[in-house]
Image (cartoon, rainbow, N blue to C red):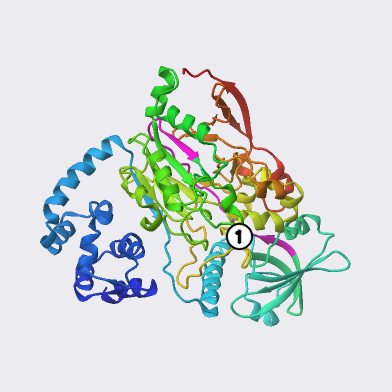
Amino acid sequence: MVQDILKIFIENGFLLDREMLDFLNELKDEDIAKEIIDKIAIVSKKKMITKNLVSENFEKLKPVLFDLGDEKKKLVEKFFVNVSISVEVKKETHFEEKKVETRSPIKVISSPILASQKLEVKDFVKNFRNRYVFLKNILQQKTDLENLTSIDKLKNNNNRNFSIIGIITEKNVTKNKNIILHVEDLTDSVKLLINQNREEVFAKAKELLIDDVVGFKCSGSKDFLFVNDLFYPDCYVSEKHKSETETYALFLSDIHVGSSMFLKNNFERFLEWIEGKNGDGVQKELIKKIKYVFITGDNVDGVGIYPGQEKFLSIKDIKEQYVVLADYLKRIPNHMNIIMCAGQHDGVRVAEPQPPIGEDFGEPLYKIPNLYLVSNPSMVEIEGRNGRQGIRVLMYHGASMHPLIGEIEDLRLTNAHRNPTRAVKHLLLRRHLNPMHGAGVYIPNAEEDPLLIREIPDIVATGDLHRTDIDKYNGILLIAGSCWQSITPFEEKVGNIPDPCKVPMLNLKTGALKILDFSDAEEEIKEVECKEVKNGDSENVSGSSNAIDKKEIVCEIEVKKQNG
């Protein structure tokens, strides 16, 4: 166990003193070790994790320590007795039980934080190997991939038809408009030909990207293979998860506090609504049932994000931007859990996975008791009780959607910036949130590619493109967030048209979804009610452009007058 604990810290660039090593070894809980890295080591900027450092930051560990069994809890009290933790634990346990009554539980399934370190080519190689092995294991389970073999054994393969799994390293179009792929696995590489006469396969192949891990049904020889069909790893929901009670979740994104184009009046109108200051008795009862508010990045406008940004800032200090943001979030009722990740404009590194917003810039956020700061991307489970799996929400701001739309012809020609969920479907199809190396800045990890979609979510919540969009894919609900910023010169230049001040509201028991419209401060609030899902669970992006083009959610606009 000592070696396992040491390995966790060393791989993340941290060291342990003897006291902490003995404590963690006796505790025998790797989750606690990871929490120390996530909640203390990264924020404190200290490379040596000592008992005193943990004691000073003990508040950050309380939520996870209260879930320990009695024996482990006694060990915590014994180890930290010199800072009177025993009394605190008893007090906080009572508070935690009380808090569960008023605020629904959440569980962070994944919130990857990678420590800053010097990167070398071998780090990227290990990251890609890790990605390939994980996706290969998924593809191997597909019964369509018959006579599966590795590339190095093709010379000895006497079967007329066989299958391989490889990663695409090169893609070219011949003079005859056929597609040639260079594909490799861990043993060798080979060339594949997709003939344009095979229309269905060719349609799939047009959407292939460099670095995609794909299963191919082939015929031919080692010198040249002909593709008869191809398969992506893909995501499918095998079991529906829902709340046992009528509970609601709201989805926000791209608030951009500090921008001179921040729609302050509209956002304050939303806050007044959620505080219960507007609306009739029915609306106020509804607000009591809202338990979760997801905010998917670009919470402030930041500073120095692009050249000349200072001309479009009303608040030029990023710390002050977070002060104002915190004042807004404090107005959200305490019975609601606020779960927030970062985006490119926030005070964290641009490279994904982005860590939670830190105290260095966002200190006021840490004083909000119902606010949970998570990484971008992250997976959060809500409404899980009594051993029953809850609803899993994958939060991802969405930086990779821009290059994806530019690379896939169908998305580019149909201006998928207007319908962000179409790009999200392609990420789910590939089970990776940043599938193209070089298209976005990321940090590789030798042990586990943090941008892989390992667990299948029930909901994917994104932002970044500033447009509300709702859709469904293989049983997974896709919610693209709106924004609270009017059109910027940059967006106007590239042709992006924001759809601001919309708030999707999901009934976690029935799956019914409404979009609240706060875009006009002078008119009554509109509710766009999404009542019907058509063929959503059976649609697949791969091989059918119609599957992407078809709008699966049918919405009816229902206007309800609000008091005040």
Q: Nearer the viewer, residue 76 or 227?
A: 76
Please state which amino acid type lies under the numbered disc 1.
Thr
Q: What residue is rendered at 35% in x and 71% in y?
A: 8
x, y percentage for residue 540? 65, 48
Identity of the residue drawn at 58% across and 63% down = 139
Q: Position of residue 55 (x, y in %)?
A: 20, 62
| Residue that numbered label 1 is attached to | 143
What is the x, y in percent for residue 264?
51, 36
Q: Nearer the viewer, residue 207 or 386?
A: 207
Residue 229 drawn in magenta: yes
Q: Using the rendered image of the protein, determine whether residue 390 is visible from the camera's viewpoint.
A: no
Which stretch appears magenta?
228-251
Please identify the quadrant where the N terminus is shown: bottom left
Depicted 473 relative to depicted 507: above or below: below
Picture quadrant where residue 480 is located: top right
Q: Residue 211, can we see it? A: yes
The answer to which of 93 and 207 lies nearer the viewer is 93
- Residue 361 location, quadrant: bottom left
**Local secondary structure at mark 1:** loop
Q: Main secondary structure of the magenta part?
A: loop
Residue shown at 88% from the left, 68% from the top: 175
